[in-house]
Amino acid sequence: MKVNSVWQQVDSILNAIDFEKLWKGFKRYKFALYDDEKVYFGDRVIEIDNRFRGNTSIDYDGEKIAIWNVTNEDLNSIEILASNIAHEMFHAFQLDNEEKRFPNDIKGLDKPLDVEYYGMKQLEAELLAESLTSRDERMRSSNLIKIVSLREKRSTLWRTPTEYEFRIETVEGAAEYLGTIVLKAIDEKRYKERITAYSQIIVDNKRLFDTRRYSYFYGALLLTLLNSMNIQFSEDIRDNPKTIMEELLSTINQRVQIERVAIDPAIEEEMTRYRKDLFDRFDKFHASHRRNHLGRYNIIGYDPMNMYKDENEILHERWVLLHDYDENQPVSIEGPVITVYNEDESQVVDYIT
């Protein structure tokens, strides 16, 4: 795989995009692609180091850049890869504008194990997916009122996990939306395929418990719907305390009465499977001979897509980066590794390898 050649192709595609038209103030950022050994900037190549982990935005030489770990799957469509790079560029834009609505991913691992919560969430998703395929404006408006009514009820009953969704939808959902409208500008057919695929994902009850990933798709589709209905949403990031859903809750005044959602046996079955899978992951980890590293640490880097929580333990399947207060230095640990938290989760007091 000639990554530098891929970089040139992505660069050419993104050169044709007017980023300012897509989101107020947005601009193109520099980007780097990397593999297991090298980092590619187009005009130069460097050896990989610990700054390059995952797909995200990082500080590099005093500026924010987008980075992407190129895999063979990415080569199936350079257009989709370019849209994914745009997603990461939007994160650079958010950071430059001092985005303050980032979620607490540690708290976000505390999932409510209540079937009604996920039943309401799935009903909301069905209304959104239906609205995206319909041209009936009255039905779309009615569905949107039901969506905000469901979300408001869910927020009242389960404030912390619902607020986590608000924030993921705002930070990651907006970035995924931006990447999706970049894809639309590049390839209309692939854009339509993505909207269809994301709509199928959010109504799949097997996806409901993967809150972080799910909210990428839901947030992107929600903004797509609002845009198609000419409903304005704030594109201001700096000093904006309101998440997209909170803004929508205050913009749309109408509500419908939300009765108790009937328990879906399929969701109940999926919840049982989820709980067993969680138990099995921790059981498998602890079944092997392990070593404790007691101390005082702060978590400063992690892979949010591959973390699982059981009481005061978090299993990081890929990697985690800690700051060791006693040694005053960072500690990079390859997974699987468990971080153990104190009672109020303010500090890591042990990690297990």
Image (cartoon, grey):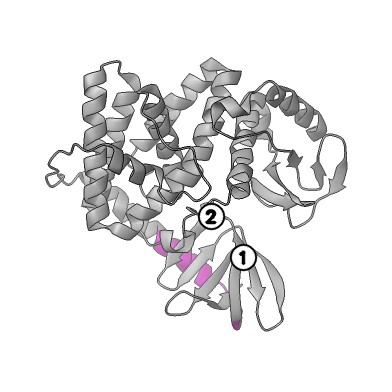
Look at 47% across and 60% down and name the residue there: 104
- Residue designated by label 1: 300
- Name the amino acid type tagged 2: Pro
Secondary structure under the numbered disc 2 in the rendered image? helix
- Can you see residue 107? yes
Residue 106, above or below 15: below
Residue 304 is tagged as 2
20 on left or right of 252: right
Look at 23% across and 55% down and name the residue there: 156
Look at 65% across and 29% down and name the residue there: 82
Q: Which mark's residue is nearer the viewer, 1 or 2?
A: 1
Magenta segment, which residues? 278-295
- Can you see residue 287? no
- Name the amino acid type tagged 1: Ile
208 on left or right of 316: left
Taking depth in this image into account, of 235 and 137 the one nearest to the observer is 235
On the image, the x and y values in percent for residue 34 come to: 75, 43
Taking depth in this image into account, of 281 and 17 the one nearest to the observer is 17
250 on left or right of 43: left
Q: Residues within 10 Å of mark 1 (few under 14, many from 20)?
A: few
Secondary structure under the numbered disc 1 in the rendered image? strand
